Amino acid sequence: MISELRQVIRSIQENTGIEMMLYSSSGEPFSNTGKKISSDFEGIRQDVIAGETYFKTEYKSTQLICAIKGCGPVEKNYAFLLADMIENSASRVTNLSRNEFFKRILLGECSPSDVEKYRTKYAVPDLPCFVLAVSFEGKTSDVTALLSQYAENEMDSAVAVSGKECAVVKFVEEQSEYQSAADFAGFVVRSLLEELGIKAQAGVGGVVRRFEDINVSYQQAAAALRMSALFNSKGSVHCYRDFILIKMLEDIPEGKLGEYLSILLEGEARELLKDEDMVNTAEEFLENSLNVSETSRNLYMHRNTLMYRLDKIERVTGLNLRKFSDAVTFRIITILNKLV
């Protein structure tokens, strides 16, 4: 029980950013480094000298005392909130349907102990798994019903996350007809179009070894969908690993990104990025592995026109996109331009 309680406290701390110290109902610390505190109070007690706020709560009928740093009206409000979160954590998933329970796990709204309850209750297999985030325009119940038909085992499932997005969870077995997560995502998108006439986009999260990390895969899949829309990515299947560079840059403070962009762009270069035809030509060239002939065919553009545009980009930015290193630099510039 103590181990489960510690997991609940850890989850609450991660979600709120408020660090708590845990004591028994008699004031004995649960950690070896803590000191015994007075338990002679009701509800909430604030110790100005110690600079701490103490509050009583319970978990599964076990009486507890918790302490947080600070002593004032804000900390008193925190104490009421945290006590309620601890008391409700034991029962908050009891009456949930399987789909709602699973949805909360994907969204990161469940504690490790809640996830373990789900795993035990529904006999979740000890297999690697991944998540697809699928966005669409259509009736959610029709989409989830269709996708649920393509499960290879009873734990593969589709659950509605919002009115226009669902998550598809797939466990990876040794014998599978799909070569990769992206291959399965392509099948899902094609099936929605062929069976229901619904156009969809799928974000593909990474494969995680433990079911406890399924939320990580979902967050990656959702991020892939978001970034594919931001950068007008081609196709209908978008893997998170293809956006790692964008995610790395996105995590840098905006002020620093602006500084990098100002270093990379000089003079007319900023104006060139406002020219959609030029930027689209460059992006297509990069997408086609710097192949002039392939790019010309895909853009229905004469080879000479393409070469003229590439030469103009080089003249304005100093970057020869036919060189791999310069092409990478240009790609970073276009990403920074959209993030800043």
Image: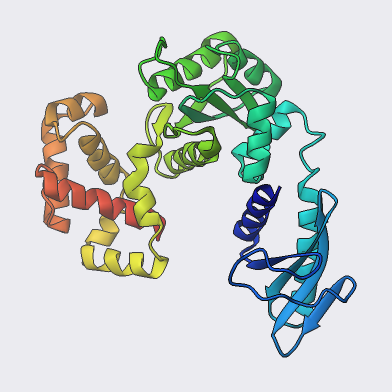
Q: Residue at the location (63% across, 36% down)?
A: 116
Q: Is residue 174 visible?
A: yes
For residue 151, above or below residue 159: above
Looking at the picture, does residue 193 appear above or below residue 11?
A: above
Which sits in the foreground, 56 or 149?
Answer: 56
Q: Visible in this render: residue 103?
A: no
**Depth check: 257 or 71 in front?**
71
Quarter assignment of residue 70 = bottom right
Residue 153 is situated, as x and y percent measured from the top left of the image, at: 55, 13
Instruction: Decide if residue 166 is on the left or right side of residue 179.
Output: right
- Of 283 and 220, the residue lying toward us: 220
Name the residue: 50% across, 18% down.
188
* Furthest residue toward right: 42
User: Residue 81: image x %, image y %?
Assistant: 78, 63
Horizontally, residue 69 falls left or right of residue 297, namely right
Q: Is residue 262 left or right of residue 138?
A: left
Q: How many marks?
A: 0
Q: Residue furthest bottom?
A: 49
Question: Which residue is found at the position 78% from the left and 33% from the top?
Answer: 96
